[in-house]
Image (spheres, rainbow, N blue to C red):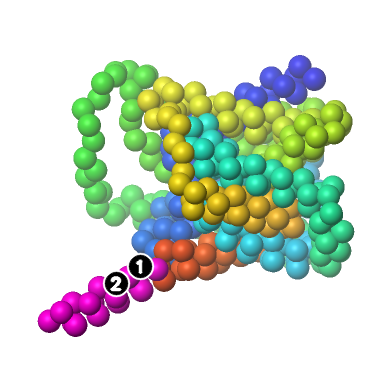
């Protein structure tokens, strides 16, 4: 238990700190691909996937960790991931983003987080469990891309790493945009940790390394998986309601560590402050949290469990889930941001025409 607590909190705190300081937000990243035509955060995700994939399969090669891709519940993955993508736009952050923003004092994220935890628990052991199990029963026999094709997984990793390296080189050749910054108030390590803007690609490498670290630390406690947010979040609420210690595992301390690490980073960078949302935003955050919990549970993972981990493990579930998460995010972004803006713009033009 001591090992579980210490290593889980440590790994989570590292992840929370890095994500908070690097503003590693996949919700914003997916949204910006559509609205601002900015792909940098998506490219950062690909870097983190590549780093983790090489590292974890290296550990598997040397017999240090174990992994089974299992089957591919394709219907649940597609529907759940699309709903999750919609939910993260309403909630204002993905699963991990909600945890680390809660650590910044953003009370809207606390509301979304409660909705996320509640619905995740309901999907696992509540009234919606039969629906969850029924939809997941529609499966393909194998989830591993390598097993399906009969090719070595290292071939797919090599191709993917090559694509990522090409993207990084191409992005580095683009002219840099000077971003105004305030004069540093600190120096040395304090400046680097808490004041200097972190590049998304540098943040992504750190996230990938932490994702690798999570595998042996988690498996040492009997939890045969790496980073995961949805099930541990549900487990916290399930434990608080039932008092059943079987719900307490390494993943629980991982997500609590994310909150702790973000809190430390926000305090150190003087970005922590309690911010209360208005009623409309609070309601939308709660709805978004519930959609996140429903979708991630149905899909078998969130933007981290599927979008970062299962993609790195070269599974159909991971890559199909990532695609439909993005499509869900774009769909919600259209109705939440694009359509209202277009309507407002047309109304202004019509008003000017009438006035003229």
Q: Could you tell me which residue is drawn at 73 percent across and 48 percent down? A: 120
Name above or below for residue 147 compared with residue 258: below
Task: Say which residue label 1 marks.
Answer: 341
- Answer whether labels 1 and 2 touch (C-beta < 8 Å): yes
Q: Would you say the magenta stretch is mainly helix, strand or loop?
A: helix
Label 2 Cα crowd, 10 Å radius (few <14 / some 14-19 / many 20+): few
User: x, y (%) of residue 169?
Assistant: 38, 52
- Horizontal relation, residue 97 to residue 80: left or right: left
Q: Could you tell me which residue is drawn at 48 percent across and 68 percent down? A: 335
Q: Could you tell me which residue is drawn at 29 percent across and 18 percent down? A: 187
Residue 315 seen by the camera: no
Observer-nearest of 279 and 263: 279
- Horizontal relation, residue 151 to residue 348: left or right: right
User: x, y (%) of residue 239?
Assistant: 80, 33
Q: Quadrant of residue 7?
A: top right
Name above or below for residue 313 compared with residue 96: below
Observer-nearest of 154 and 75: 75
Which residues lie in the magenta part?
Answer: 340-356
Gap in Å between the C-alphas at discs 1 and 2?
6 Å
Q: Quadrant of residue 35?
A: bottom left
Observer-nearest of 104 and 185: 104
Task: Say which residue label 2 marks.
Answer: 345
Q: Quadrant of the C terminus?
A: bottom left
Q: Is residue 354 magenta?
A: yes
């Amino acid at each position: 238990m001591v090992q579980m607590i210490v290593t889980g909190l440590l790994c989570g705190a590292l992840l929370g700190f890095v994500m908070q300081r690097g503003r590693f937000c996949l919700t914003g990243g997916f949204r910006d691909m559509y609205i601002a035509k900015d792909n940098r955060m998506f490219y950062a995700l690909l870097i983190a996937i590549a780093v983790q994939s090489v590292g974890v399969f290296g550990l598997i090669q040397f017999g240090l960790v174990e992994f089974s891709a299992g089957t591919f519940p394709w219907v649940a993955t597609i529907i759940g991931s699309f709903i999750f993508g919609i939910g993260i736009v309403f909630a204002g952050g993905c699963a991990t983003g909600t945890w680390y923003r809660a650590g910044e004092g953003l009370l809207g994220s606390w509301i979304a987080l409660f909705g996320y935890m509640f619905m995740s628990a309901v999907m696992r052991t509540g009234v919606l469990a039969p629906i969850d199990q029924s939809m997941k029963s529609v499966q393909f026999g194998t989830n591993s891309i390598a097993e399906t094709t009969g090719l070595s997984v290292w071939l797919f990793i090599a191709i993917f790493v090559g694509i990522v390296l090409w993207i990084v080189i191409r992005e580095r050749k683009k002219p840099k945009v000077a971003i105004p910054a305030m004069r540093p108030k600190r120096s040395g390590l304090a400046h680097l940790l808490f004041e200097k803007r972190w590049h998304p690609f540098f943040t992504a490498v750190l996230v990938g390394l932490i994702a690798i670290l999570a595998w042996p630390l988690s498996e040492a406690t009997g939890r045969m998986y790496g980073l995961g947010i949805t099930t541990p979040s549900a487990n916290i609420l399930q434990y608080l309601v039932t008092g059943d210690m079987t719900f307490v595992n390494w993943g629980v301390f991982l997500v609590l560590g994310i909150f702790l690490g973000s809190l430390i980073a926000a305090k150190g960078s003087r970005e922590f402050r309690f911010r209360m949302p208005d009623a409309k935003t609070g309601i939308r955050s709660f709805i978004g949290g519930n959609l996140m919990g429903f979708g991630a549970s149905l899909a078998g993972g969130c933007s981290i469990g599927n979008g970062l981990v299962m993609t790195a493990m070269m599974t159909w579930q991971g890559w199909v889930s990532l695609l439909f998460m993005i499509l869900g995010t774009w769909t919600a972004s259209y109705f939440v941001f694009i359509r209202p803006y277009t309507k407002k713009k047309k109304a202004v033009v019509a008003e000017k025409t009438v006035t003229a």
